[in-house]
Image: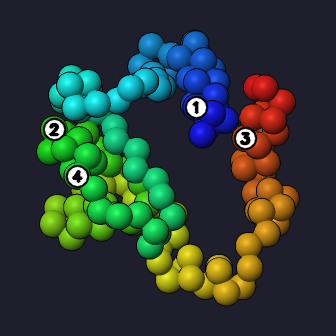
Amino acid sequence: AKMIIKLITSVGEVVNNDPVVGDRLKVIYLENYRVSLAEKVIPAADLSEQISTAGTEASGTGNMKFMLNGALTIGTMDGANVEMAEEAGEKNLFIFGMRVEDVEALDKKGYNAKEYYERIPELKQVINQISGGF
């Protein structure tokens, strides 16, 4: 968990100080997230990122609150995103990544991260940037 927090804050440093997007896009990590903080953040959010492996996440309502307040949901077809797509229409969310059937097929085949790293130049660049400290 500490490495994920470090990654978020490191990405934030790069994005927030980027001369092209730094004044239009901010990456922040909210410590001690709680209801009173959510009451301030949710209405102010333009984007809601909800990423989990399809078929593994319990349904939640946090992202529904973001959507009801006008934020675009960017995420995988999992958890509450499934219900939101059914009710509001998938065209009203930005869904990407594998579906449950894809995850099950990959589990059967076997997952080799290095294959993806070698095959996808953009992924390789991102991994290299993260491992090299940007």
Q: In x, y percent, where is residue 9?
A: 58, 24
Q: Residue at x 46, y 53 (%)?
A: 51
Which label is found at residue 128? none
Q: Tell which circle, 1 or 3, labels the residue nearer the N-terminal end.
A: 1
Of 124 and 3, the residue lying toward us: 3
Local SS, label 1: helix
Which label is found at residue 61? 4
Q: In x, y percent, where is residue 39?
A: 18, 28
Vertically, is 63 above or below 25?
below
Local SS, label 3: helix
Q: Nearer the viewer, mark 2 or mark 4?
A: 4
The answer, for residue 77, to whether it is visible in the render is: yes
Check disc 1 and report the residue beneath it.
5
Q: Residue at x 23, y 52 (%)?
A: 61
Check disc 3 and report the residue beneath it.
126
Type of amino acid at the residue the image marks with label 2: Asn
Q: Residue at x 76, y 26 (%)?
A: 134
Q: Nearer the viewer, mark 2 or mark 1?
A: 1
Type of amino acid at the residue the image marks with label 1: Ile
Type of amino acid at the residue the image marks with label 4: Thr
Q: CA distance from mark 1 to mark 3?
A: 17 Å
The answer, for residue 15, to whether it is visible in the render is: no
Dots 1, 3 in contact, CB < 8 A:
no
Q: Residues within 10 Å of mark 1 (few under 14, many from 20)?
A: few
Q: CA distance from mark 4 to mark 3?
A: 31 Å
Q: CA distance from mark 2 to mark 4?
A: 13 Å
Q: Tell which circle, 1 or 4, labels the residue nearer the N-terminal end.
A: 1
Q: In x, y percent, where is residue 43?
A: 18, 29
Which label is found at residue 69? 2
Q: Quarter-wise, where is residue 31 in the image?
A: top left
Dots 2, 1 in contact, CB < 8 A:
no
Q: Residue at x 23, y 41 (%)?
A: 66
